[in-house]
Image: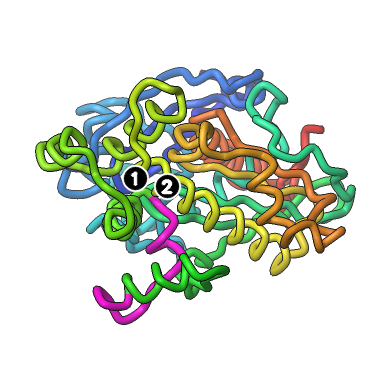
Amino acid sequence: MTRTQPLLLAGDIGATKTDLALYTAAGLEQSGGVPCREETFLNRNFACFDDVLAVFLGPGGQVPPYACIGIAGPVINDTAEMTNLDWHLDARALERRHGFAGMRLINDLVATAVFVPCLDSDDLYSINSGAAASSGTVAVLAPGTGLGQAFLIPQGKGYIPCPSEGGHSSFAPRNGEQMDLLEFMLRRQTHVSVEDVCSGQAVPDLFAFMRTRHTVPEWLNLEIQQAEDATPIIIQAARRAVEGKRVCGVAVHTMQLFCDILADEAANLVLKTMALGGLYLGGGLSPRILPFLQSERFMRIFTRDYNSPMLTRVPVHLILNRKTALLGAGEYGLRNLVQPQSSGATIPSRG
């Protein structure tokens, strides 16, 4: 590897799995990002990220000079306590232990947001084409295990990526059904965040609420009882139902409630950040819930029953590229570690 093409380790650590990849600058800038090597690890098989990293690098293997890791949790001073996983990461400690010349830890939604300006049209599903403001903030909302949020503030020819822990803000019901949901949840816990009712970990609770209103087929009860994780079972049952394969009203109502809350929170995020440059739905759940994201219903809720001309003009896109956070970590590392003199604190737009 030449000195002009140093290797960069990029990572995306979620609650369930960790994706790691080695890139060169040229590999990152190719369409879709072309890694030298890439591997996925199930987090339940490891006590800490250190162990994952050791396996990926291999005993006596060459350590790349730079690393940038996206993490599902808040990052403060290059250290992180993960939100839905009992892992602690410290960039300086990892540098010393593994021999990196430079490492950055960033929030995984910051990583996702960083790569949004690099996405191609094939990477997106348009819910509302809208009319993006050329100098507008861009927001990202990502339902996965949790509910991640981040945004990009335009500066010059690029953007400054900003983290947010907005998923932990309080859930605000928008109608009678959601008020009943809040009361249902408050019987189980003292505070209900929007993440508690709009994330992968929230799906079983939404289903438990819906089963107080709708009949649950015996076959679905059996599948859920036998499953280690009920979320994919409920989503699959709802998908089969909307595809006309097997009737399951309770699952469909569960996922529709999920998407209604998502649309409302998407509008909240746009309003709080003035994201007139567009709203992007990312995360591992977004492509899986696409059959339930009916554009007309989503936009009716998003625009407050079309009473907000500003929200009506905001472009809304769903990210289909499942590697966006990994590629974004690579892009961030490229601009801030490998080529820091070229961009300063901003992430250049390739558009």
Are dots 2 and 1 in contact, CB under 8 Å?
Answer: yes
Q: 282 or 127, which lies in front? A: 127
- Disc ID at residue 346: none
Instruction: Say whether residue 135 is left or right of residue 180.
Output: right
Q: Is residue 77 above or below residue 90?
A: below
Q: Residue at x 83, y 43 (%)?
A: 130
Q: Is residue 342 above or below residue 150?
A: above
- Disc ID at residue 253: 2
Residue matched to label 1: 250
Q: Residue at x 35, y 59 (%)?
A: 90
Instruction: Say whether residue 51 is left or right of residue 310.
Output: left
Boundaries of the magenta span = 186-199
The number of callouts visible is 2
- For the residues marked 2 and 1, what is the alpha-carbon distance in whole angstroms? 5 Å
Task: Examine the structure image and report whether residue 169 is included in the region drawn in magenta.
Answer: no
Q: Position of residue 104 (x, y in %)?
A: 48, 51
Secondary structure under the numbered disc 1 in the rendered image: helix
Q: Residue at x 70, y 33 (%)?
A: 126
Instruction: Say whether residue 174 is left or right of residue 250.
Output: right
